[in-house]
């Protein structure tokens, strides 16, 4: 019975990839006033972004109750005795704590559940989840899969660009001063993930130059083991970036993903990110 992998919807996994690798995805919630939507199920990205722009009030997001994670663990315990849940950064969401709490609620106490704080989000998280699922499919036990996933985290490098930092600021994911500076200078900020939080790196004067920065960032690696590009609303920019990077990593192997409603609430329209995995040494 192979290890089963669980993650949350902020991993932005392409559905066909999750299905192929047997990854279970827990949808988090988006709230527009009194209406509550399950990320990617009741509200798709295509439906969400026009709604986000049209609404004067920013929607809110929330995680699920521990019992919902526990229900997923119980379902999987009929197929396996080992489960690894890998969640969005605990500094950005309560999903990690909830997944831990759920472990105490499962009915089958013989089923071992481990929970990993990825310190990542979107397809950076997705690449860790995919790597863990592939290792599990090869027959590795839970300890080995967990060790591999932690090693993957240390080899992932992320850069993101935004049309505006206002959504990041409103969601409390970056300081007001940094967001104001970006707006005042009318520049396109580049952020990375550091210790589980979005952290500014550089600024570029135009979106074209920001995308070129992302391209150069990836090209700068001597070797690439895995590559993912994720976006909120401009697929043409994401596809163009994937095509431009074909010289250093095959576009057929690059994961291209649309960022779902939960993360999109905090990143806003026009966000574009790249995640690079270095090979094991």
Image (cartoon, rainbow, N blue to C red):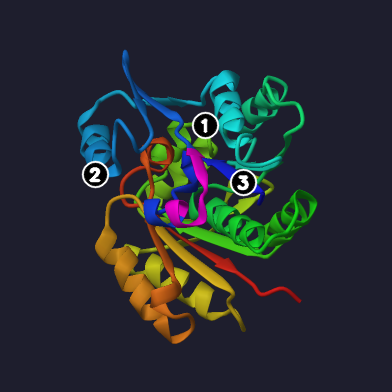
Q: CA distance from mark 3 to mark 2?
A: 30 Å
**Residue that extends furthest to the top in the rendered view of this protein:** 34
The residue where tag 3 is placed is: 4
User: 261 or 69, which is in the foreground?
Assistant: 69
Q: Is residue 94 visible?
A: no
Q: Is residue 181 visible?
A: yes
x and y percent of residue 89 in the render? 62, 41
* Left or right: where 40 falls relative to 281: left
The residue where tag 1 is placed is: 172
Residues under numbered marks 2 and 1 in contact, where contact means CB atoms less than 8 Å apart:
no
* Left or right: where 161 falls relative to 224: left
Disc 1 crowd, CA 10 A, few/some/many (<14, 14-19, 20+) = few
Task: Work out whether 24 lies above or below 68.
Answer: below
Who's the residue at 56% across and 80% down the image? Answer: 220
Disc 2 crowd, CA 10 A, few/some/many (<14, 14-19, 20+) = some
Q: Nearer the viewer, mark 2 or mark 1?
A: 2
- Residue 19 located within the stretch drawn in magenta: yes
Task: Work out whether 131 lies above or below 7.
Answer: below
The residue where tag 2 is placed is: 46
Q: Secondary structure at mark 3?
A: strand
Task: Work out whether 268 lies above or below 124.
Answer: above
Highlighted range, magenta: 18-25
User: 194 or 37, which is in the foreground?
Assistant: 37
x and y percent of residue 135 in the render? 66, 61
User: 198 or 22, which is in the foreground?
Assistant: 22
């Amino acid at each position: 019975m192979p290890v089963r992998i669980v993650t949350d919807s902020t991993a932005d996994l392409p559905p066909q990839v999750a299905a192929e690798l047997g990854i279970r995805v827990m949808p988090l919630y988006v709230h527009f006033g009194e209406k509550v939507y399950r990320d990617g199920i009741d509200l798709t990205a295509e439906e969400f972004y026009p709604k986000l722009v049209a609404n004067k009030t920013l929607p809110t997001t929330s995680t699920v109750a521990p019992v919902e994670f526990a229900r997923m663990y119980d379902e999987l315990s009929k197929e396996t005795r080992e489960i690894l849940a890998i969640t969005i950064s605990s500094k950005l969401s309560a999903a990690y704590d909830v997944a831990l709490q759920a472990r105490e609620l499962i009915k089958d106490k013989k089923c071992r559940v481990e929970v990993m704080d990825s310190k990542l989000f979107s397809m950076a998280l997705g690449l860790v989840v995919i790597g863990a699922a592939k290792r599990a499919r090869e027959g590795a036990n839970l300890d080995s899969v967990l060790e591999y996933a932690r090693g993957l985290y240390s080899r992932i490098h992320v850069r993101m660009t935004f049309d505006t930092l206002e959504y990041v600021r409103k969601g409390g994911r970056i300081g007001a001063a940094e967001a104001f500076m970006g707006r005042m200078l009318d520049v396109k900020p580049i952020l990375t993930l550091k210790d589980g939080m979005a952290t500014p790196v550089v600024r570029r004067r135009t979106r074209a130059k920001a995308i070129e920065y992302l391209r150069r960032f990836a090209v700068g690696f001597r070797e690439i083991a895995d590559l993912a590009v994720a976006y909120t609303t401009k697929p043409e920019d994401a596809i163009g970036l994937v095509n431009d990077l074909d010289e250093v990593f095959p576009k057929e192997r690059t994961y291209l993903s649309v960022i779902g409603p939960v993360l999109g609430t905090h990143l806003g329209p026009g966000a574009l990110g790249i995640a690079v995995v270095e090979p094991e040494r």
